[in-house]
Image (tube, rainbow, N blue to C red):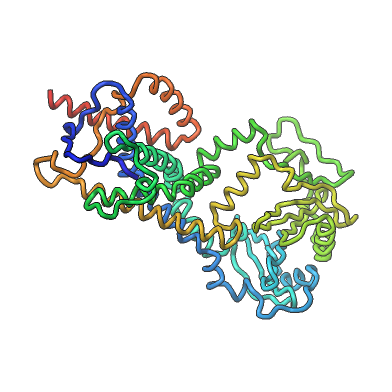
Amino acid sequence: MSSTTEPTGRREQPAPAGTAPAGRSRQGVRALLVRLHFYAGVFVAPFLLVAALTGLAYTFTPQLDQALYGDRLRVEEVGDRVLPLSEQVAAARAAHPEGTLASVVTPAGPEDTTRVVLSVPELGEKQRTVFVDPYTAEVQGELTTWFGSTPATTWLDDLHRNLHLGEFGRLYSEVAASWLWVVVAGGLLLWTGRSRGQRAPSARGVLLPDLRARGVRRTRGLHAATGVWLALGLLFLSATGLTWSQYAGERFGRVLDATRGHAPQLDTLLPGAEPAAEEAGDAHAGHGGHGTRTEAPPVDPASFDTALAVAREAGLGGTVTVTPAADATSAWVVAQSDNVWPVHYDRVAVDPVEGEVTATVRWADHPVPAKLTRLGVQGHMGVLFGVANQIVLAPVAAGLVAVVLWGYRMWWQRRPVREDRTALAGRAPARGAWRGVPLPFLVVGVPAVAALGWALPVLGVTLAAFLAVDAAVGLVRRTRGA
């Protein structure tokens, strides 16, 4: 977005480069915003560009999956009757006896296959998913999946999150998410706060670029006006991306703990079952209040039919995931995963022996923070509301790419081309701008920035680094000038 005011009727001579506004005034606040926006544009924009490009690619993963794996994801012909899950599971196990049954995902639509998920030790945290025609119980193939994602989707997800560099690579995406809202908010303030003489810009001047302008003014108008249109979408992506980032996400989890904003846990302990007592001093004894787990019993395929029927009677419609009991004292879990509005995320614990529901967690029971977090993550991933989510996300990601490229074009257009620096269309914002900020702003702003640095550690560290470098360069230049 814009980082300089537009010229009025006469040409104004800029202050010498490297000087801050004289005196403390609101203009000092603007100068500081300009400097911060400039730094973010130059140093953080590459991270934003990579995040936007990889996110844009990830947006189209549903269509990519259909193109690459359609023979496994969809049936050849829709039948008249869906076979019991037990028959489909038996067919999958006959073709793939390796590993253990982890879960079964029912088809999302009449043309979709049933997914039988197996835990195979050599795959680590990944799983083997067998795709079965629900009308014929014919196995159509298998894929190595990660939390239900196909290999292509998993590869693009890793690219977007960490550039395939593991935990270290996650820093790139957290830098992008942490600074995105700063760039957007700062750009909005600078663009809407500019003035032509004594008048603020009109709504048209804010929302639409001046295509009659030339050079840096035209580029700045395209950059800023596009940023205004994208602002809400970019702020949404920043906020939702931070909720499961490496460092800010941990801080966010603490806030949810303090406010009891987490999703309620489903009690899977069977009625009458006695949780094993925890051994004193054993940090590994017990899990979720259930004590030491006993070995899981063999899974009877017929229990899938019972668990699904009981869950349907309890009101769980649409596509569901049926997960066998983790041990002899636990119930089976049936969870909805319907992302089409209105969403359905109810979960029930089922005792397949007695054929009854032992515990229920309804979507309506979730606290507001938990709901917003779940919906935000689904929306960030482009799976909420189906194609509508993709239609919104794709232009936002593509627009961010354009805004970043226009920002660098402005930087190039304002580069020094001759000794007369005052003849340039623009210049880098002055160093030491914070010295022109009114004291009340500093009194309020410094603690606020400190709190923000705690909540968003990566933002705090990089911001401190920018300011330190800026101060050091300014000090060196003043020393040489003296």
Would residue 264 appear left or right of 244 to someone viewing this image?
right
Query: In which quarter of the view is residue 370 placed?
Result: top right
Give me the residue at 61% from left, 58% from top: 385
Q: Is residue 122 visible?
A: no
Image mark count? 0
Say above or below: 67 vs 385: below
Pick the quarter of the image with the C terminus. Answer: top left
Compared to 93, does 464 lie above or below?
A: above
| Image location of residue 375, percent across then percent down | 61, 49
User: Front-most of 174 and 27?
Assistant: 27
The image position of residue 73, as x and y in percent, is 62, 71
- Residue 243: quadrant of the picture: top right
Compared across the picture, whether 322 is left or right of 149 comes to: right
Can the viewer see residue 58?
A: yes
463 or 433: nearer the viewer? 433
- The image quadrant of residue 366 is top right
Q: Nearer the viewer, residue 273 or 260?
A: 260
Would you say 462 lies left or right of 13 here?
A: right
**Residue 435 x/y as whole percent:** 29, 23
Of the 4 image quadrants, the one containing the N terminus is: top left
**Residue 252 drawn at (x, y percent):** 56, 37
Residue sitting at x 90%, y 55%: 354
Q: Nearer the viewer, residue 325 or 440?
A: 440
